[in-house]
Amino acid sequence: MLGSHLLLAVGRIPNTQDLGLDQAGIVTDERGYIVVDDELRTNVPGIWALGDCNGRGAFTHTSYNDYEIVADNLLKGDHRRVSDRIQTYALFIDPPLGRCGMRDADIRKSGRHALVAKYPMERVGRAVEKGETQGFIKVAVDADTKQILGAVILGTGGDEVIHILLDMMYAKAPYTTIQRAMHIHPTVAEFLPTILSKLQPFT
């Protein structure tokens, strides 16, 4: 099937120019994003900036998490920080993509001793059963701490299964926890222990 149009979107500009930020004395950066600290406070006491306007994420889930951080800090005396959250997102394409944590470039830059495994979806029973074998699962772990550094799942269920790995990252649990887990058959998630038993040195 041929396409007739190509839609390309590059970059985002915050819609902050008509908020009267200059009158309130609120500082913005060179692109118009409201400058905030790690708890989403602006430079003006009593004013916080949440969502797309602060440049700390451009997703519904990051915006809602901004609210959770500010609400818990204000109402519960917590000290939640933006820097504590792990970057994650999904692309609801066909097949769907789920990603969390560090990318290959981030791992290389960090200088960590890492291990990685990558397997095609055509080897995942559930994908074969559904006739949706495009894509792959890739997981990187720290060889010393055994914590998961990042993962990509491009394939059926990838936008959901990625949360298993994301939650393990928040728990700071070793990858061996999943590697030794028993998962339900036939699912995409059941292949994670197999993948994590095939880790090789990251190059």
Image: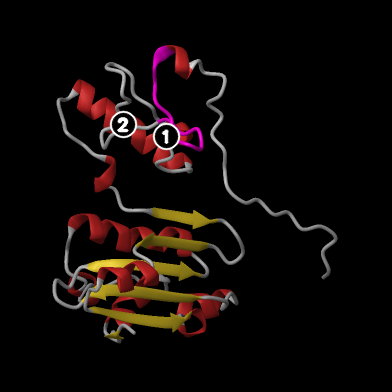
- Kind of residue at badge 1: Asn
Horizontally, is 115 left or right of 122 in the view?
left
Q: Which residue is mark 1?
A: 54
Q: Nearer the viewer, residue 157 or 142?
A: 142
Residue 56, relative to residue 9: is it above or below? Answer: above
In-front residue for pair 175/31: 31
Question: In the structure shown, which secondary structural element does the residue marked by tag 1 occupy?
Answer: helix
Q: Which residues are the magenta region?
A: 24-34
x and y, in percent, of residue 41 in the image: 29, 27
Badge 2 local density, few (<14 within 10 Å), some, or many (20+)?
A: many
Give how far apart the Cα atoms at labels 2 and 1 are: 8 Å
CB within 8 Å, label 2 to label 1: yes
Q: Confirm whether the magenta stretch covers residue 28.
A: yes
Residue 28's place in the image compared with 164, above or below, is above
Percent position of residue 30, x then y: 48, 37
| Type of the residue with mark 2 | Leu
Residue named by callout 2: 40
Residue 188: x %, y % from top left: 42, 71
Q: Position of residue 158 (x, y in %)?
A: 47, 64
Quadrant containing the N terminus is bottom right
Residue 116 shown left or right of residue 113 in the figure: right
